[in-house]
Amino acid sequence: MIKELVDLAERIPKEGISHDALDFVPISIECVIDKEGNFKKFIPHEKQLSLCERIAAKKGKARLLVDKAEEVLEFVDEGILDKSELKKTKSKSKFKHELFMQKLKNYSELQELNPVLSFYETNSSNGVDKAREVFATEVDEKQRSGNIAFLLLGEGKRIHEQDIIYNAIISDFEKSMFELLENRFEKCSTCDSSSYPITDLPHGAIKRVPKGQSSGCALVSYNFTAAESYGLKGNENSSICTHCGRASVDAMNWLLANGSMKKNEKGKEVFNYKNRKNISDDTAVVFWLRNSDEISILDMLDNPTEESIHSLFDSVYSGSKTSATKLDADTFYSLTLSGAAARIAIRDWIETSLDYLQSNLVQWFQDIEITRFDTNEKKISKYYPRFNSLVLSAKSKSDSTVQHGRIGAVLWKSAILGFSPPLWLLNSILNRIRAEQSEKPPEGRKLSLWDYKLPERIALLKLYLNRINKKNERNNIMAELDETNKNTAYICGRIFAVLESIQYFASGGNLNVGIRERFFSFASTMPSTAFGRLMKLTQHHLSKISGEKPGLAIDFDKKLQELICKLEGNCFPPVFSLEDQACFAIGYYHQKQNEFSNKQKNKEKQS
């Protein structure tokens, strides 16, 4: 995994970065001084990236000429701190400022730094002291947290952006690396070379990790002796050289941040990630290709359309790759990750060919394809639920980001690698269906199937059963009503849907709580007991309908008899397994969708 990240780092755009010792840092404030070190003014502005000395971790270190107000001015905002915190904060600020000054003095032989040294030492009263006063009164509180850089009055470049400063930083970095390499011949486990040292230095901070620290998280880190061995300390145990460590961090930061602004369906400007997919508040997926930059094929997971899916199907079944771009002999990589305090927790690592990914996506859409009654077009149509909708539909009502992330990670693996979802996911979906089917509708409103996210949950049940059926060489569950399906649980679900319709017509549609709310969970788990009671109740409903609409009563009775005759032994089983409960729910859903369609056809015939 680290090796592939390092290879990616060699391909990603790094305009202006010429050396491992340098990196881009956001700057929000210019501190303008003259050649004698007199302070002139602060220039706050929007964040601008500037090439600076690279610091992998700030603890115990300082960056040359660029840093926060604490380091540059020893500034403490006393107005927002109480007395108990003020003393402690001042002590930390003093320590950070001393580190900043020590770094500055290490480069004191550079004449270009003379104005800055005067600002702090020989001309401090008109320099740093005056700047500290102005900073506290004239710089807005919202902008004080940004990095400060020095700008010489009348010059266009910041002081640290001069080539002589960059060369000095690079020279110092290479000298320190050479010293670390002396008498050490360990080979890096990633690049298999000894060109760079393996040290106990942090590889760098990875930012924008879900639930991670804002200052960044570490991908590789050791902070207790139990994780160390063979007399090695800290990151020496990882056997990753400084170059590969930095490169892997650069690649992760690029994957987590790469994208651009784009208008969504509502016309609002939102940031569109190109190599990242957020699954939950605490989990994200990053992905890339070995030889290409675009992975447009994955856009279908978030925006599935019949046109794009049919194009994908054609490209696979015809053996042609013209509908998908850049698929020749490429490799797809995916990382599922979460923040865990100051570290990154890798939940999953996927490496597969792009051709295999394409075939698995075809199977994914086939397995989640269902039909639903389109209330706008008044007809049954194919429906491919969005990936995020599927993840949300399986999540319980409790605000559990851990559960949300687990579900998303499992479904991502199912889509990319074609794996079967685990049994616990099936149980979670069935619990949601049973719980919400048992809820009473809000007063004055009748809930439809769409209030329950039932189409998405049925799609997930179908996905699970089809993947299991494939292993056991059984017939797959179809996307729409299957009259030939002889599965007992599937038929029982259809029967329950018919019984619900009978009750609906018997009551004239005036029902707040029907058999679905009262019996769905019971019938889907212990059908023999539940249907025994339901059949008695249905006879009363049929009698009432026959007095008002005898033809309709005959049609219902005939339909019931046909379905019961399909049951094995013409009787209901005592209990259903989890897989049977899934078939029951699918059978119920298919029958309801079919009835919606028939109602529309009857209305059209009557008109």
Image: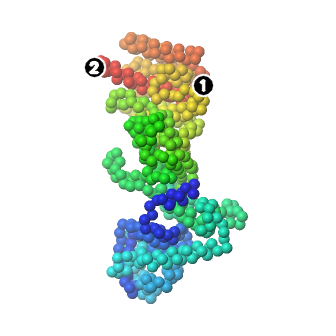
From this viewpoint, which residue is outermost toward the bottom?
Answer: 122
**According to the image, label 2 marks what residue?**
607
Q: Quadrant of the C terminus?
A: top left
- Element assignment for label 1: loop
Determine crowd level at label 1: few under 14, some 14-19, many 20+ residues with C-alpha closer than 10 A.
some
- Element assignment for label 2: loop
Foreground of the two, 540 or 573: 573
Under mark 2, the amino acid is: Ser
From this viewpoint, which residue is outermost toward the right?
Answer: 230
Return the x and y of residue 234 as percentages of the image width and height.
Answer: 64, 65
At 53% from the left and 62% from the top, the residue drawn is 247
Let me know if residue 411 appears in the view: no
**According to the image, label 1 marks what residue?**
575
Let me know if residue 32 appears in the view: yes
At 38% from the left and 37% from the top, the residue drawn is 307
From this viewpoint, which residue is outermost toward the left?
Answer: 607
Foreground of the two, 26 or 22: 22
In this view, 517 is above or below 150: above
Determine crowd level at label 2: few under 14, some 14-19, many 20+ residues with C-alpha closer than 10 A.
few
